[in-house]
Image (cartoon, grey):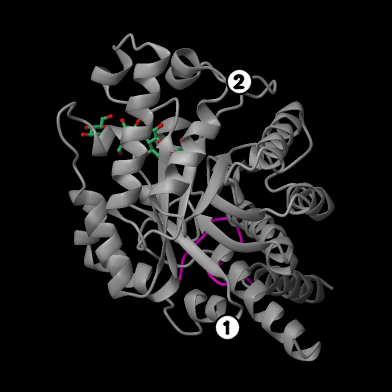
Amino acid sequence: MLRRRFLWSILIVVIAATLLTGMPGCRSGNDDYEPIEDTSPPYLSELAEKLDFYIGAAVGESYLRNSEYVEVLKREFNAVVAENDMKWSTIRWSEHSYNFAPGDAIVKFAEENRMMVRGHTLAWHSQNPGWLRNKKYSREEAIEVLEGYITEVVTHWKGRIKEWDVVNEAIDDEGKRRDSIWQQWIGDDWIEIAFRAAHKADPDALLFYNDYNLEYPSPKQNAVYNLVNGLLKKGVPIHGIGFQGHFSLEYGGVPAKGTLKASIDRFANLGLIVQFTEVDVRIPKPVTASKLKQQAESYRRLLEVALEHPACNAVLVWGVHDKQSWVDYTFPNTTAPLLFDNSFYRKPAYYAVRDCLLAEIERREVEGK
Ligand code: G3I
């Protein structure tokens, strides 16, 4: 009797361990996560290319000196966006000159590796240099400064940067205009002024309005919808909407697929491209195998919707690996929001993204598309 009970308990332990190790990287039965080294193909970039899709990452010029980082970036991604190197704080840290060197390095790297480049961002309330914030410009002076900057920067990378986040986060969570320097100095039409200047400098560049919390219905989503609808009616050159896609497991991660799809539909029905431009899914500490699995399910939802939607052609994650993410210093109780861990090991979220790309390739093959 005792012997039989003992054998049963061994069997139960074995079954539980097998279930937990079904996911790559989950190697222990106590919800700890043990990453495993795996760099085998297929890679995300090659799968994305088959689908005419971009899987991109936010990068920093300083990281391009890290060989491990570069190896993963080149292997897995076919698009990049400058995380900080094309912001006012970098390009115009000095009032009297333009600093293009970090952005140039990113564009050169992307060209050498056949990656699409998104430029981020021409006008934002944040990361503006102190000398600019301290000015007291009249409306006319501010328009001249904004147009001058946009013309100079877009012209510098004309034909090389395919897409620009022209305006970033101009609407707050209540759906009101954010009180930025441009809003204060110029008034409501600063947004259209920015788009028109960017279009004039590079008529072939695709121009985006980019913001967070657009992935589900809210006063903010309504306000952004009304804003871009109004701009389009006036003939303002705007081609796309960036859903930043910063999510947290604390709030359920990525919304339900129906919610996400309806949100994309809304903007797609205006004729706009919709891209997920800054995706991450942060995990409340401590990181466990089951939370990584939930994170993977979030990424899966997002990729499934994005890949199926005809108006969506890109998902960019906000960093290559967890160590590089803005999340740890901004939300210290959360961490590990990306596809690769601190040591560049693939996480369950990586495999979820790859599965979605493979499934979409298969779906299109079956449908003969
Ligand atoms: O470069 C300095 C360094 O010299 C200094 O020692 C250090 C000390 O704090 O700061 C460094 O600058 C930091 C910079 O990132 C580069 O790492 C800034 O403090 C920090 O504020 C800045 O944060 C960036 C943030 O935008 C600024 O608001 C994040 O890296 C970047 O990921 C984040 O990106 C934004 C998108 O542009 C728009 N959407 C939201 C997204 C997340 O906030």
In front: 160, or 119?
A: 160
Look at 39% across and 17% down and name the residue there. Answer: 140
Of the residues tagged 1 and 2, which is closer to the observer? 2
x and y percentages locating residue 231 in the rendered image: 65, 37
Of the numbered discs 1 and 2, the one sitting upstream in the chain is 1
25 to the left or right of 79 = right
Look at 74% across and 71% down and name the residue there. Answer: 6
Q: Main secondary structure of the magenta part?
A: loop
- In the image, residue 271 sits, relative to residue 231, either above or below, namely below
237 to the left or right of 308 = left
Look at 71% across and 34% down and name the residue there. Answer: 230
Location of mark 2 (residue) = 177
Indicate which disc residue 170 carries.
none
Q: Which residues are magenta?
A: 22-36
Q: Identify residue type, mark 2.
A: Arg
Where, by quadrant of the figure, is residue 198 drawn?
A: top left
21 to the left or right of 150 = right
Indicate which disc residue 50 carries.
1
x and y percentages locating residue 119 in the rendered image: 40, 50
